Image: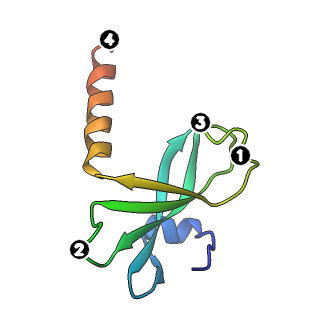
Amino acid sequence: MEEKEPTCEQCSANEKVFEDEHTIGYAIWYPQMGGYVGRAVALISKGEGGADCFDVLVWHDGEFPFDGEGGNNPRRLHHCAAEQFVRFGEKIDELQSRHEG
């Protein structure tokens, strides 16, 4: 796979930017880390095996949270259970709302 950084337009449109017999890559915005969103490609498995896990290639223009890694792009991050991100975000919203007003 050629690891080519997607454009802003491709990320906003979740454009398909890669496909082979096992994987489809969609351009996507990776959430803020250290104040920077990252252009990314989510690599989604076509098959049933490993459907809960996925890799994301992230191009990140800040140091944090990738300190000491030499600024190499993209960073390949492996994730499982995407619903954990949803629950995490909802819990953060709940905890922050305890301290509003």
Q: Estimate the spatial distance between the alpha carbons at disc 4 and disc 2, rounded to whole Å.
A: 47 Å
| Residue at the spot 28% in from the left edge and 52% down from the top edge | 81
Estimate how packed mark 2 is, as few (under 14), some (14 to 19) or many (20 or more) residues with alpha carbons within 10 Å: few
Q: Quadrant of the C terminus?
A: top left
Asked if 20 appears above or below 100 in the picture, the reply is below
Q: Estimate the spatial distance between the alpha carbons at disc 1 and disc 2, rounded to whole Å.
A: 33 Å
| Residue at the spot 72% in from the left edge and 56% down from the top edge | 72
Q: Amino acid at mark 3?
A: Gly
Q: Estimate the spatial distance between the alpha carbons at disc 3 and disc 2, rounded to whole Å.
A: 34 Å
Tag on residue 34?
A: 3
Q: Quadrant of the N terminus?
A: bottom right
Reading the image, the residue beneath label 4 is 101
Q: Amino acid at mark 4?
A: Gly
Please tell me whether mark 4 or mark 1 is closer to you in this view: 1
The image position of residue 43, as x and y in percent, is: 43, 69
**Is the Cβ of the residue at disc 3 closer than 8 Å to that at disc 2?**
no
Q: Which is nearer the N-term, disc 1 or disc 3?
A: 3
Reading the image, the residue beneath label 1 is 69
